Image: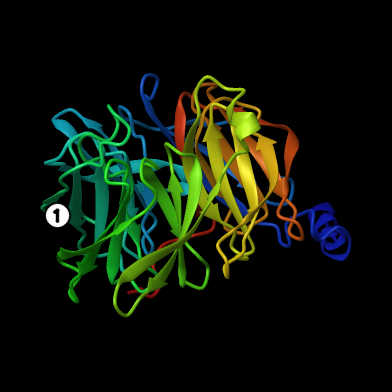
């Protein structure tokens, strides 16, 4: 038995709640933002050791803020500033994580702050915070970008002056069955719902589901069983839970909890919530706090929605705009936008709590997005709808 296999066997028979259950290697890509974002950076992550390799530039492009992986092809998409204007660029993922551009499309809206690819691989959606629009862009069988379709939000709650006077879509999220696109809008204080047509060639607005007034809806995730929506409110640093009816495509708010104690918020000049994650096991939730520069860990209570805050973990960096969990569910990575760092934290599978990985920091200029792609993935596979 080799040393790597021996270590894995010890992990499986010993402190199984503390380490990953199986060794796997992932390509990790980091989107970078204003003002230092000069490209997409790449590293590899070893789930056995919890170590990130040093990050290096995989593709030179201006402000490739948010990234998304194609569900079928070994392809990555980035929203970025192109020579012709703001848009989306697609890359083939090659050996050693190399990125080769193969398709691009200009966005008729402003600079996008988020991108999501439909699980069928037939389209992607971008969200434009500045001008209140979202963009539907079809994808062909090879992942090539087609002609964009623009959808515009209107209004604003006006509760927080200067932030909620006009619409600000902040992310686009696909329902588990693929039939809806849900868009949290920071200025509207709620989620706008779009129904996707059967051919996956367009969508139509079907509803709006309000959250807390002045909350500033930002990012959301579905529960692992698809019955709940967890919505993160940026301005109020709160987590709202909705029940989700996939048949009717409707969401009903039934609980909201704070992501940080008031005593911690009072100790900062600035506070803002940024990202929300659901643990693959469904028992824990994670949200990032800018200002306090931490990750809040919750024990999920799907029945009442009053999730228990069990830990506030420092990220060992500054301004965590984005966090992500490895597909194996054993590690959380936190991007420190203002510290130019990405930190690694082990997830205890029994408690959900985080432990900082000693020497678990790599440098990336202005990191604002983290995505994983299995290093062994070679493309192909059955399409999902």
Query: Please, which colouring scheme is shown?
Result: rainbow
The residue that disc 1 covers is 146
How many residues crowd around disc 1 within 10 Å: few (fewer than 14), some, or many (20 or more)?
Answer: some
Q: On the picture, is 213 further left or further right than 349?
A: left
**Above or below — where is 152 with respect to 17?**
above
Would residue 85 appear left or right of 45 to someone viewing this image? left
Disc 1 is placed on an element classified as loop
What residue sits 70% from the left and 54% below the top? 352
Q: In which quarter of the image is the C terminus?
A: bottom left
Instruction: Please tell me which residue lies in front, 120 or 175.
Output: 175
* Residue drawn at the location 14% of the way across and 51% of the way down: 151
178, 242: nearer the viewer: 242
State whether residue 336 is above or below residue 380.
Answer: above
Say if 312 sits above or below 251 in the image. above
Residue 114, located in which quarter of the rendered image?
top left
Task: Point out residue 113 in the picture as x, y percentages from the top left corner.
Answer: 31, 39
Q: Quadrant of the N terminus?
A: bottom right
Residue 256 x, y percent position in the rendering? 50, 53
Residue 312 horizontal/vertical position (percent): 67, 39
């Amino acid at each position: 038995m080799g040393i790597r296999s021996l270590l894995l066997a010890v992990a499986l028979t010993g402190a199984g709640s503390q380490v990953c259950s199986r060794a796997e290697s992932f390509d990790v890509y980091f989107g970078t933002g204003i003002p230092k974002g000069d490209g997409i950076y790449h590293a590899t992550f070893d789930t056995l050791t919890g170590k990130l390799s040093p990050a290096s530039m995989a593709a030179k492009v201006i402000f490739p803020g948010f990234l998304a992986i194609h569900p079928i092809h070994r392809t990555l998409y980035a929203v970025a500033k192109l020579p012709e204007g703001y848009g989306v660029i697609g890359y083939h993922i090659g050996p050693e994580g190399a990125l080769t551009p193969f398709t691009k499309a200009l966005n008729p809206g402003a600079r996008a702050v988020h991108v999501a690819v439909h699980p069928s691989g037939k389209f992607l959606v971008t969200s434009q915070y500045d001008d209140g629009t979202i963009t539907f862009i079809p994808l062909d069988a090879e992942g090539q970008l087609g002609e964009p379709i623009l959808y515009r939000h209107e209004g604003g709650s006006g509760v927080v002056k200067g932030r909620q006077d006009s619409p600000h879509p902040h992310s686009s999220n696909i329902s588990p069955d693929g039939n809806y696109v849900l868009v949290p809008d920071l200025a509207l204080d709620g989620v706008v719902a779009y129904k996707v047509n059967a051919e996956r060639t367009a969508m139509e607005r079907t509803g709006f589901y309000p959250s807390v007034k002045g909350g500033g809806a930002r990012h959301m995730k579905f529960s692992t069983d698809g019955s709940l929506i967890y919505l993160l409110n940026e301005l109020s640093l709160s987590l709202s839970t909705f029940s989700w009816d996939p048949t009717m495509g409707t969401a009903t708010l039934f609980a909201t909890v704070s992501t940080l104690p008031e005593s911690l918020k009072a100790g900062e000049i600035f506070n803002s919530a940024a990202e929300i994650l659901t643990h693959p096991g469904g028992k824990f939730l994670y949200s990032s706090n800018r200002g306090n520069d931490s990750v809040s860990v919750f024990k999920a209570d799907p029945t009442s929605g009053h999730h228990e805050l069990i830990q506030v973990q420092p990220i060992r960096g500054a301004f965590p705009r984005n966090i992500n969990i490895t597909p194996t569910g054993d590690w959380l990575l936190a991007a420190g936008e203002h510290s130019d760092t990405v930190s690694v934290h082990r997830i205890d599978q029994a408690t959900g709590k985080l432990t900082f990985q000693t020497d678990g920091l790599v440098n990336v200029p202005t990191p604002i997005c983290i995505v994983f792609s299995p290093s062994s993935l070679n493309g192909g596979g059955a399409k999902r709808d």
